[in-house]
């Protein structure tokens, strides 16, 4: 009897390493799944934060207009961010859509581009709004010899004020309106962020 008891006990000890290995494999599996879940949740959280702090929508239209009108895609995205944060809205001054185009500016763009008559409600269409806004931005860059500071100052405060501040020779310090100075600085900062963060989406 004692001999059989020792044999059974010895057999139990021989099976021990196998069970231990299985246990370790299970623990490692759970650890791996846990790591994967944490990584995925981290990516989702980061993406969620990014969509709030630096959103990007309609990138296909932005890329297309960037190529067609030879305007930096990150600059277009930065202007949209500054004007509307990619949300369709109407300002107290009547500016509409993603790039906040006023009816007067829209009619001027229509005249300059040789476009057809449009309805004011059309500015709520992201495609039309980005096309009009990018056309206007390209036109401003053209008349100010590709000086981004002057073009942005004119986009925000009007070409008349931009001319008074020096036109294509102006610096940010020449801008006399604090709101416009802050606007230009903000767009330039976001332009760098969009180029870095959305390099693939914006076609770089």
Image (tube, rainbow, N blue to C red):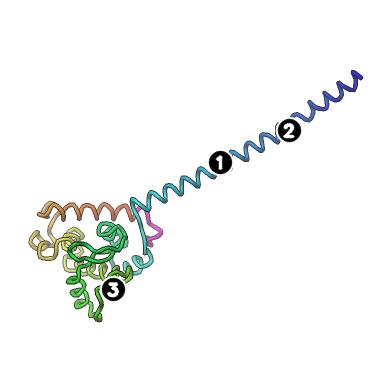
Residue at 86% across, 21% down: 6
Alpha carbon distance from label 1 to label 3: 49 Å
Q: Is residue 45 left or right of residue 118?
A: right
Residue at 32% across, 62% down: 73
- Give the percent coordinates (x, y) of residue 50: 37, 51
Mark 1, secondary structure of its residue: helix
Mark 2, secondary structure of its residue: helix
Residue 122 circle label: 3
- Which of 155/145 is in front? 155
> Range of the magenta residues?
196-202
198 within the magenta span: yes
**Vertical placement of 87 versus 64: above or below?**
above
Label 3 Cα crowd, 10 Å radius (few <14 / some 14-19 / many 20+): few
- Give the percent coordinates (x, y) of residue 117: 24, 80
Residue 19 circle label: 2
Asked where in the image residue 188 lies, by quadrant, the reply is bottom left
Q: Residue furthest front?
A: 92
Label 2 Cα crowd, 10 Å radius (few <14 / some 14-19 / many 20+): few
- Give the percent coordinates (x, y) of residue 184: 20, 55
Alpha carbon distance from label 2 to label 1: 22 Å
Q: Residue furthest top?
A: 2
- Give the percent coordinates (x, y) of residue 141: 20, 66
**Vertical placement of 103 versus 202: above or below?**
below
109 within the magenta span: no
Alpha carbon distance from label 2 to label 3: 70 Å
Residue at 67% across, 37% down: 25
Q: Quadrant of the N terminus?
A: top right
Q: Is residue 161 left or right of residue 189?
A: left
Looking at marks 2 and 1 on the same chain, the residue that comes earlier in the sequence is marked by 2
Asked where in the image residue 28 lies, by quadrant, the reply is top right
Mark 3, secondary structure of its residue: helix
The residue labelled by disc 1 is 34
């Amino acid at each position: 009897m004692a001999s059989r008891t020792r044999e059974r006990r010895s057999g139990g000890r021989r099976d021990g390493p196998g069970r231990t290995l299985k246990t370790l494999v299970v623990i490692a599996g759970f650890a791996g799944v846990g790591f994967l879940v944490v990584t995925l949740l981290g990516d989702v959280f980061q993406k969620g934060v990014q969509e709030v702090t630096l959103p990007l929508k309609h990138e296909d239209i932005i890329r297309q207009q960037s190529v067609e009108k030879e305007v930096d895609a990150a600059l277009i995205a930065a202007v949209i961010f500054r004007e509307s944060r990619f949300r369709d809205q109407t300002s107290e001054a009547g500016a509409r859509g993603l790039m906040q185009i006023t009816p007067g500016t829209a009619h001027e763009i229509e005249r300059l581009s040789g476009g057809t008559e449009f309805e004011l409600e059309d500015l709520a269409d992201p495609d039309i709004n980005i096309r009009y806004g990018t056309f206007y931005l390209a036109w401003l860059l053209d008349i100010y010899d590709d000086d981004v500071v002057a073009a942005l100052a004119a986009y925000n405060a009007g070409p008349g004020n931009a001319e008074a501040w020096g036109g294509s020779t102006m610096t940010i310090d020449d801008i006399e309106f604090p709101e416009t100075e802050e606007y230009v600085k903000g767009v330039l900062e976001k332009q760098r962020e969009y180029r870095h963060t959305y390099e693939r989406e914006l076609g770089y």
